[in-house]
Amino acid sequence: MRRGSSKIRLLIGAGIVLFAVIKYCSSAETNPYTGEKQHIALNEEQEIALGLQAAPQMAQQHGGLYPNENYQAFVDQVGNRLVNNSIARQTGYRYEFHLLADKNTINAFALPGGQIFITYALFSKLENEDQLAGVLGHEIGHVVGRHSAERMANQGLMEGILNGVAIGIDPNTAQGAAAIGQMLNMSYGREDELQSDDLGVKFMIESNYNPEEMIGVMEILKAAAGPNRTPERMSTHPDPENRVEKIKEAIEKYRNQ
Ligand SMILES: [Zn+2]
């Protein structure tokens, strides 16, 4: 009798483990836009909700929005041209482009679901519209590649976030603040950056921008990084020099398609 019940317990235990493994494996889906297999527990609506929740805090960290509406309209125009001429449009994401007032931090970043930011410090260093398209195209690449959601899944942030998303994340609760804070400080992997460069080049070509200007963006980022490099974070774009070769390859690849 005793032996029998411990056997049953063992079976139940094994069943639970098996269920967890199956659940993880079945959460793998192929990203239809990049062809990449990813384990992501969030759906598009949840990604959008999460990005919208975190966007005000992101803006706040960079001095709010830049007050000049003409510059903001220009950023919108370039961003929307990239979206409307590429696969980005076929996604369910809601793209919004924000010019931030920050005059010191040379940066651009994307939140899940389509919230995209560029600081005035970076905007003012750009030499032409094509370079702006390069920056925004790269960030759209992070959204389409679902890099934030993937990172969160890998870091085990999902459970808290899913609970939060179900009821709407409240940044004022400890859980909401922690989830958003972690997302804002998250770092992308090198593979994510290279894929975003690749997608950015693709979007530029599809939208009739000169993709060579992506290399100009790398030079600006390289000059900005200087000798005192900050740690690689979500908000930075590591090793611009090493990315140029891959960008050149992407230009060749997509030009000949
Ligand atoms: Zn990036």
Image (spheres, rainbow, N blue to C red):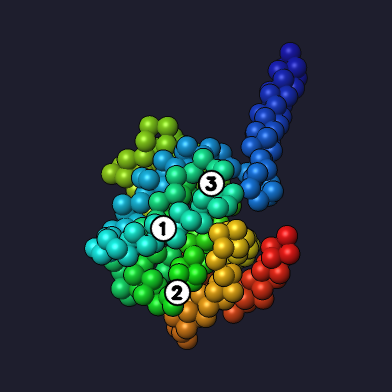
Q: Position of residue 54 (x, y in %)?
A: 37, 49
SS at badge 2: loop
In-image side of 5 versus 47 (left or right): right
User: Which element type, helix, strand or loop, lies under badge 3?
Assistant: helix
Going by the numbered disc 3, the residue's amino acid type is Arg
Q: Residue furthest front?
A: 208
**Pointer 2: residues within 10 angstroms few (<14), some, or many (20+)?**
few
Q: Which mark is residue 89?
A: 3
The amino acid sitting under disc 2 is Asn
Q: Are marks 3 and 2 in contact (CB under 8 Å)?
A: no
**Residue occupying the point 67% across, 30% down:** 19
Q: Relative to 150, say whether 106 is above or below.
A: below
Q: Nearer the viewer, residue 155 or 193?
A: 193
**Residue labelled with disc 1:** 77
Mark 3 / mark 2, whichever is N-terminal? 3
Q: Which residue is mark 2?
A: 128
Up/down of 229 relative to 26, above or below: below
